[in-house]
Image: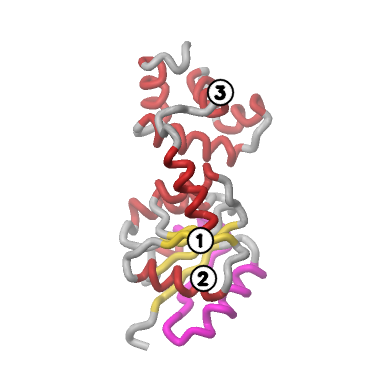
Amino acid sequence: MNNSIKIFIADDHPIVRDGLISILETQEDFVIVGQAGNGGEAISKIKNTAADVLICDLEMPQKDGLEVIQDLQKIKPELPIIVFTVYDTDERIVSAIQSGAKGYLLKGASHQEIFHAIREAHKGGSILQPIVATKFIQKMNQQEDALSQREKEVLQEIANGKKNKEIGQVLFISERTVKFHISSILSKLNANNRTDAVQIAIKQGIITI
């Protein structure tokens, strides 16, 4: 079809990819143009694929979904990305949307919700499931400039020169969780990178060295 929507799927579970493909192929205006099982593969393939919409999981090897979104904002900023995940925490929702995702769907979404999200994203719109939208709004209504205690702890460890893996070991959290905290910190402090965030935090008295 001339008006078909070309879709790329990135998810590390083959059964999820196969299930999505089976569902999406029931729609005459959807065409699957590629798939990837990890974030690195997704970036590599999408560079050379004429996709109209990317459906992307958050938890993937090599590069997680958040890194994929951020990289594609530099490589293909016009490509709408829909997050398709089991994670419904405020931090992940906000991080994904602030990084550039146009949609955020939980893996329990109905077929119609998925179809609608793809068509809306293709038209340039954004779509969030009601439960996701509620959490996003509640989070954004909070004081955005107030770092959580955990974010302050992460930032302090960054100032101490520790890398993500080391921070995770010290705070007993996963490296991926550290990455999400850092993304939130950069957003709240309007910082360009980790070094910038530390300098801003020191000036504001949030952390000490």
Label pair 2/1, CB-CB below 8 angstroms = yes
Q: Name the residue under label 1.
A: 129
Give percent across and percent down for residue 48. 38, 67
Q: Mark 3 points at which residue?
A: 153
- Left or right relative to 179: residue 54: left
Say which amino acid is labelled 3. Glu
Dot 1 falls on a residue whose secondary structure is: loop
Report whether residue 41 is seen: no
Q: What stretch is highlighted in magenta?
A: 14-43
Say which amino acid is labelled 2. Glu
Dot 2 falls on a residue whose secondary structure is: helix
Dot 3 falls on a residue whose secondary structure is: helix
Disc on res. 101: none
Give percent across and percent down for residue 157. 54, 22
Q: Nearer the viewer, mark 2 or mark 3?
A: 2
The colour scheme used here is secondary structure
Q: Does the magenta stretch include residue 122?
A: no
Toward the viewer: 2 or 109? 109
Q: In which quarter of the image is the N terminus?
A: bottom left
Image height of 128 relative to 116, above or below = above
Task: Name the image quarter holding residue 19.
Answer: bottom right
Q: Name the residue under label 2.
A: 113
The CA distance from mark 2 to mark 3 is 38 Å
Q: Which residue is drawn at 54% across and 65% down?
A: 36
Give percent across and percent down for residue 121. 38, 66
How many residues crowd mark 1 within 10 Å: few (<14), some (14–19), many (20+)? Answer: some
